[in-house]
Amino acid sequence: MSAKHWHLISYDVRDPKRLRKVAQKLEAYGNRVQYSVFRCRLDRPTLEKLHWELNQLMTGEDDLLVIPLCPSCAGRVPIHSTGDQSSWAEPLPSFRVI
């Protein structure tokens, strides 16, 4: 089982039809932060699947940027660009190591 991590995913798609398809695809995996920026909490296999699906929709003239965020960095994303950050916090473990 692969652990989930936060990722910021940004895109620049030149064609309006492809733009809508890319946005719809990302809405299925995460939340919109800005017009072309999404936050997604994904494990490695799911991230690879999303990357493959986006490559099927996008062409060589489009750009895709995927930035992995550590829990500390995810919590420091400025409020003005993210809205509610409360769901960015890592879930607390359900156990304690003594």
Image (cartoon, rainbow, N blue to C red):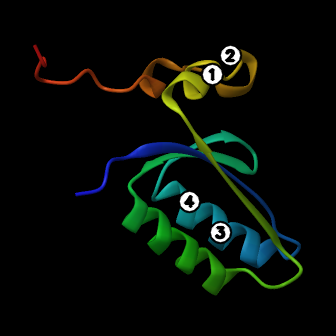
**Which circle marks residue 33 in the picture?**
none
Q: Estimate the spatial distance between the alpha carbons at disc 2 and disc 4, rounded to whole Å.
A: 21 Å
Taking 2 as reference, is 98 above or below it?
above
Q: Estimate the spatial distance between the alpha carbons at disc 1 and disc 4, rounded to whole Å.
A: 18 Å
Classify mark 3: residues with Cα within 10 Å, few (<14), some (14-19) or many (20+). Answer: many
Closer mark to the observer between disc 2 and disc 3: 2
Q: Estimate the spatial distance between the alpha carbons at disc 2 and disc 1, rounded to whole Å.
A: 6 Å
- Position of the N terminus by quadrant: bottom left
Q: Amino acid at mark 2?
A: Ile
Badge 4 marks a residue whose secondary structure is helix
The residue lying at 57 percent from left, 71 percent from top is: 51
Q: Earlier in the sequence, mark 1 or mark 3?
A: 3
Badge 1 marks a residue whose secondary structure is loop
Circle 1 residue: 83
Badge 2 marks a residue whose secondary structure is helix
Q: Estimate the spatial distance between the alpha carbons at disc 2 and disc 3, rounded to whole Å.
A: 25 Å
Badge 3 marks a residue whose secondary structure is helix
Circle 4 residue: 26
Q: Estimate the spatial distance between the alpha carbons at disc 1 and disc 3, rounded to whole Å.
A: 22 Å
The residue lying at 38 percent from left, 55 percent from top is: 43
Mark 3 touching mark 4, by CB under 8 A? Answer: yes
Classify mark 4: residues with Cα within 10 Å, few (<14), some (14-19) or many (20+). Answer: many
Circle 2 residue: 79
Q: Earlier in the sequence, mark 1 or mark 4?
A: 4
Residue 88 x, y percent position in the rendering = 47, 27
- Position of the C terminus by quadrant: top left
In-image side of 57 versus 26 (left or right): right
Mark 2 touching mark 1, by CB under 8 A? Answer: yes
Circle 3 residue: 22
Residue 53 x, y percent position in the rendering = 54, 78
In-image side of 23 versus 97 (left or right): right
Q: Amino acid at mark 4?
A: Leu
